[in-house]
């Protein structure tokens, strides 16, 4: 069955089971999909498996404050709609939430406050869609660097056969060698080198260092700077 194009994946983290169930009910009644967790650790374990558009976080989570987790989520997904649903009414917490562009919702809350967060996420998604179609957004080209380090965990493909890893490494090295040369540089080799590096991330293959002690990802970016092309891994 096809997914509703308006449906959001919503992360709900609260150690109060009754409240967690209530939030899930509100989310699903709005036509969205809710993934509940009782702690920050449980919630973070879901991140490699799901892409969330919305997160509802309690502040007093076991092992990690909600704002700390919210800051991590904001850094890794600037477009995520995040709400801190908390019984702690310290002005400092509300001020920090606002600084991180996190909606502050005090407990006890009204259902309409939760619904408003969900509706706002849908509206924001429509705005981003319009910008994408007009090619007005900064991420017209895929922002690989921001998410390259997540690939291994997302695909989770351990124990790649040695022959596959050796072939991949040899190809990457050969293409990087050609790309260093002004005379041998081609866009084809640029694409093949980048594809190989991304495949290594997906497969979880540890690539060797260069003689200078750089990773092959760093080597790729250095070559791209020299050749006047876009780097891909500098943030990772």
Image (spheres, grey):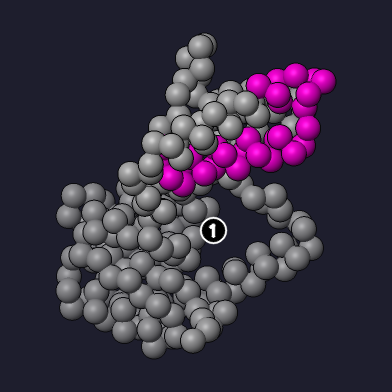
* Image point (17%, 70%), residue name: 16
Q: Quadrant of residue 39?
A: bottom left
Q: How crowded is mark 1: few (under 14 residues within 10 Å), some or many (20 or more)?
A: some
Q: Which of 151 and 91 is in front in this view?
A: 151
| Residue 57 horizontal side relative to residue 206, left or right | left
Q: Is residue 193 magenta?
A: yes
Residue at far top of view: 212
| Residue 111 horizontal side relative to residue 131, left or right | left
Is there any visible trace of residue 230 in the rendered image? no
Q: Which of 127 and 192 is in front in this view?
A: 192
Task: Determine whether 35 is above or below 82 in the image.
Answer: below
Q: Mark 1 points at which residue?
A: 79
Residue at far front of view: 163
* Image point (47%, 14%), residue name: 213
| Residue 32 x/y as whole percent | 43, 80
Magenta part of the chain: 177-205
| Residue 143 x/y as whole percent | 61, 47
Q: Which of 98 and 83 is in front in this view?
A: 83
* Image point (65%, 39%), residue name: 192
* Image point (36%, 51%), residue name: 156
Q: Does the magenta stretch include residue 190?
A: yes
**Dominant SS in magenta:** helix
| Residue 47 x/y as whole percent | 37, 57
Q: Which of 89 and 177 is in front in this view?
A: 177
Secondary structure category for the residue under label 1: loop
């Amino acid at each position: 069955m096809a997914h509703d194009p308006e449906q959001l994946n919503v992360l709900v983290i609260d150690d109060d089971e009754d409240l967690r169930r209530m939030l899930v009910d509100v989310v699903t009644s709005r036509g969205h999909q809710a993934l509940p967790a009782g702690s920050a650790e449980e919630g973070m374990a879901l991140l490699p498996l799901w892409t969330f558009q919305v997160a509802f976080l309690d502040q007093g989570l076991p092992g990690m404050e909600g704002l700390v987790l919210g800051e991590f989520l904001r850094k890794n997904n600037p477009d995520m709609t995040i709400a801190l649903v908390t019984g702690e009414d310290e002005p400092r917490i509300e001020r920090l939430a606002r600084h991180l562009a996190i909606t502050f919702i005090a407990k006890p809350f009204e259902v309409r406050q939760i619904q408003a967060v969900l509706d706002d996420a849908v509206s924001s998604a429509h705005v981003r869609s319009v910008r994408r179609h007009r090619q007005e957004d900064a991420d017209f080209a895929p922002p690989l660097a921001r998410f390259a380090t997540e690939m291994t965990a997302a695909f989770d493909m351990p124990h790649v056969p040695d022959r596959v890893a050796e072939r991949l490494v040899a190809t990457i090295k050969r293409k990087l060698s050609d790309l260093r040369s002004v005379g041998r540089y081609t866009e084809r080799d640029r694409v093949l080198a980048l594809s190989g590096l991304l495949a290594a991330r997906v497969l979880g293959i540890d690539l060797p260092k260069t003689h200078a002690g750089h990773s092959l990802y760093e080597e790729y970016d250095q070559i791209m700077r020299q050749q006047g092309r876009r780097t891909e891994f500098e943030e990772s």
